[in-house]
Amino acid sequence: MKLILQFIRPHWKLCVVTILLLMVDVTGALIVSTLAAQMLNLGTSGASFDLLLQTGAKMAAASILASACAILGGYACASLSAQVGKDLRVAIYKKSLKLSIYDFRHFGTASITTRTVSDITTIQFALTSFIQMVLPVPVIFIVALTLAFRLDVEMGVILLVVVAVVFFLAMFIMNSAAPLFRKLQKLLDRMTTILLENITGVRVVRAFNNEKREESRMGTAFADYAATSIKANRRFANLDGLSFLFINFFVVVVYWLSGGRISAGRLQIGDITAIIGYALMVLYFLMMAQMVILTMPRALECCDRVRAVLEHTPEIQDMVSENPAEESAGDEVLAFKDVSFRFADAEEDTLSHLNFTCKRGQTTAIIGGTGSGKSTIASLILRFHDVTSGSVCLNGVDIRDMTQAYLRDHLAYVQQKAWLFSGTIADNLRYSNPKASEEELMHAADVAQAGEFIRSLPDGLHSYVAQGGTNFSGGQKQRLSIARALVKKPELYIFDDSFSALDFKTDAALRKALAKETKDSAVLIIAQRVSTIQHASQIIVLHEGTMAGIGTHEELLKNCPVYREIYESQTKEAQEG
């Protein structure tokens, strides 16, 4: 509940207006019921037509006022719920931008998606239902019971007992159902995860002819969810049946007791109608409250899940609030100083005692076998992870002594798996520099060897890009990703095995064009192919997380057995091919 109150607080005026309108609505309904009883009493006692007309006019006015407040209250409640839902989604989205890769693994991408969409929708529905169906209940109880006691104390006591029994029964069932709804949300996460895997990995599923296996997995997840949902709903179905039983029991008791009272002149027919009307209204709202109670355990669980994300402390945080002063840049752009790194769940270091520098106007390359830690170096530079020991410095300053935004403003990163956003080619290229002109975009595209195929498209830079760039080939996506980095014109370019999707001719042309374009910046290339990096100013050879060698291509062939083995194996493969 603290989470909901936190997000309602900015909209407290709308909340107060909503509650007041709904209170007037239910009070008006009770007044109409009371006036109806008076009309019946007046009719049976032979009152004048003017008095009947006057009472009827009061009923009409009360009905119109209650109806107007019900409509306005519903509209205000819907607006409040929409505002709270929007604020919650914005808060989760902003928080997700601060989460590290490890944080996302902790929650799970599917779970974050479910919390942002499904969980908040459940919270919105519960909030709307709570305001409209639960908040008026205390007012109805107090007013209706007061009016019932004024007419007949004994019947007022019976009504109070029936209401209390139904209320405590509802509380008991809600508490017993809460664990089931917590389980439901976890099962929903499981369904989302499997569904996401099947959609994104549909080609793998079909390639291995494993449709039936995936159908079985999905069917099991659906069945578990359905079984738990049925179990929870059965409890609330029992509650509905018991509530109707008590309502009917009260009506029978009222009719049984009313006969003698009417004969004795203690009650009139209209009074009996009023008491039953009060009881039905109280129990009607109590039944509606029970329907809301059906959503409350699930909504509270959703609140806990959303709060867990919002209150989670990111693994990577800004250590300082101010950035270092911009000074005249020297030759040394990036430096690794005795850097070691170990993942939180690992037993040994992934990288150990790395020492190297990347200088302006030079290309530094990193090569090594699979699992040697090459891409982890890029993650450390971008501060997707923090070093375990040692320091990574940008322009002589430890990257932990600057904000993440400042650090990444000085870098351009091209990852191994190219990713493009839906929109146009120009939109994607401007992702790194929103102010870039079309001339600058085409220049970057030409350097990245993407200019020719962009010009061949009917709309050129304004050609449509599907989500993920699925309407382009792997090589085209990779070249566009490289062009996007070039538009930024940073101090350090990081190419994380981003030439692997290119053929040798395009690779050579791109490296030649890059040498001219990046002459005032430092370049770090992480690669698998020796041909891509053999002309680099210095090459770092990684082997099982340690530096097996550093130097030029020629020096490493003489002095580094690991590099020589990589070179010979690739040369042999090329000759055999």
Image (tube, helix red, strand yellow):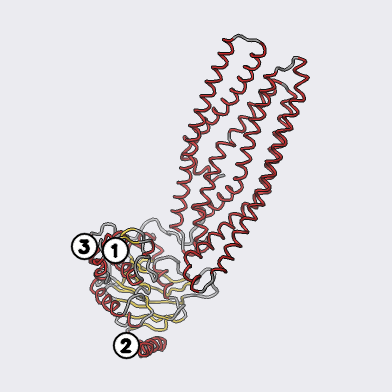
Q: Quadrant of the C terminus?
A: bottom left
Q: Quadrant of residue 228?
A: bottom right
In the picture provided, is 269 more to the left or to the right than 111?
right
The answer to whether residue 97 is above or below residue 380 is above
Tell me what residue is drawn at x 61 percent, y 33 percent.
137
Q: Up-down: is 396 above or below 134?
A: below
Q: Is 137 placed left or right of 99 in the picture?
A: right
- Which disc is residue 13 wearing? none
Determine whether the residue tagged by mark 3 lies in a helix, strand or loop: helix
Could you give the CA–CA distance between mark 3 and mark 1, rounded to whole angstroms?
14 Å
Residue carrying label 2: 554
For discs 3 and 2, the disc positioned in front in the rendered view: 3
Secondary structure under badge 2? Answer: helix
Asked whether the viewer can see residue 325, the reply is: no
Provide residue 453's location: percent of width, then percent of height.
Answer: 26, 69
Q: Position of residue 58 (x, y in %)?
A: 55, 18
Q: Nearer the viewer, residue 371 or 298?
A: 298
Residue to which mark 1 is pinned: 488
Q: Which residue is mark 3?
A: 439
**In the rendered view of the protein, which quadrant contains the N terminus?**
top right
Comparing labels 3 and 1, the label whose residue is closer to the camera = 3
Q: Disc 2 to disc 1, how far (Cα)?
A: 33 Å
What amino acid is labelled 1 in the image?
Lys
The residue located at (55%, 37%) in the rendering is 131
